[in-house]
Amino acid sequence: MARVTERIRLGPAALNPFTLHPYEIAGQIAFLDSVSGGRAYLGLAKGAWLDQVGIEEERPLAALQEAVAVIRALLAGDDAGFEGEHFTLAPGATLAYPRVRDRVPLSVGSWGPQTLRWAGSVADEVKVGGTANPELLPLVREWIGNDRVRLVTGCVTVVDEDGDRARERAREVVGPYVDVVARHDPTLAPAERPLESFCIAGTPEEVAERVVELWEAGADRVELGTPQGRTTPGGVDLVCDRVLPRLNC
């Protein structure tokens, strides 16, 4: 992607420090920033479903805070070392990759008010994943605590010429997200799980309308996530040819 693009940002959304050490995260981002000419960004999150691979998260916010400190020190070329509860970095430790910039934009993914408040003080943007619920976004902005940090939402997206077929396909793939997201969204009643709260699906015109609705609710960016269509190539083509022009993108 870095070699065949010139303007788009490139980065993971998101990595977590429980399955990948911050030193490795910093190295990967430094390398991506180098090969892309300074277009990398870093997405970090606590992550979901880690219990399924036997990982227990103890004090996840503290781990995220330490991970950011380690990554930023390494990207800045600071070799003073770091001693934390979760991570350590020996004095003199540096990256074995070229550094284009001393800092890359940071995106923090979370649903937790406490984590979002912290992210509001250190991140460039916050992502609330797995949701297309416009009623949630003003509340998330309150949790962030300022208007400086960009608010991003992203979710399963299916665009198709046949809106009903798009929604059918979305139901097939959105299931793993619903249980995780529904219990964290305080604007939804316990038994309330409408499809449109968790994904964007429909015709190109309907998908564009949903994006505008989320913009108007406070999203600075809306990510149209996989599978994009009943097939990914077909969905990407429709997004590019039929959705983005309606959004003046």
Image: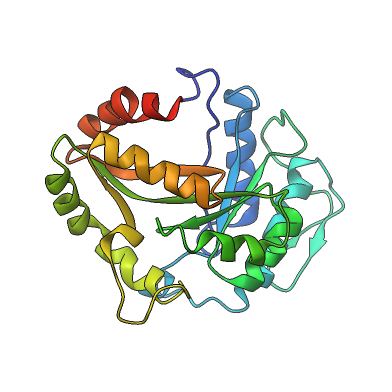
The correct choice, above or below, for 157 with respect to 132 in the image is: above
The quadrant in which residue 35 appears is: top right
Residue 23 x %, y %: 65, 51
Residue 69 visible in the snapshot: no
Q: Quadrant of the N terminus?
A: top left
Q: Is residue 150 left or right of residue 198?
A: right
The quadrant in which residue 122 appears is: bottom right
Q: How is the image coloured?
A: rainbow
Residue 48 visible in the snapshot: yes
Residue at image position (71%, 58%) is 120
Residue 208 x %, y %: 35, 37
Q: Is residue 247 left or right of residue 16?
A: left
Q: Nearer the viewer, residue 197 or 149?
A: 197
The quadrant in which residue 88 appears is: bottom right
Q: Is residue 226 left or right of residue 93?
A: left
Residue 68 x %, y %: 70, 56
Residue at image position (35%, 61%) is 197
The correct choice, above or below, for 97 with respect to 55 in the image is: above
Please identify the residue farthest to the right as the structure is shown.
80
The correct choice, above or below, for 120 with respect to 113 in the image is: above
Residue 98 x %, y %: 69, 30
The correct choice, above or below, for 207 with respect to 109 in the image is: above
Please identify the residue farthest to the bottom as the structure is shown.
190
Q: Nearer the viewer, residue 70 or 79?
A: 70
Residue at image position (73%, 74%) is 85
Residue at image position (53%, 26%) is 8
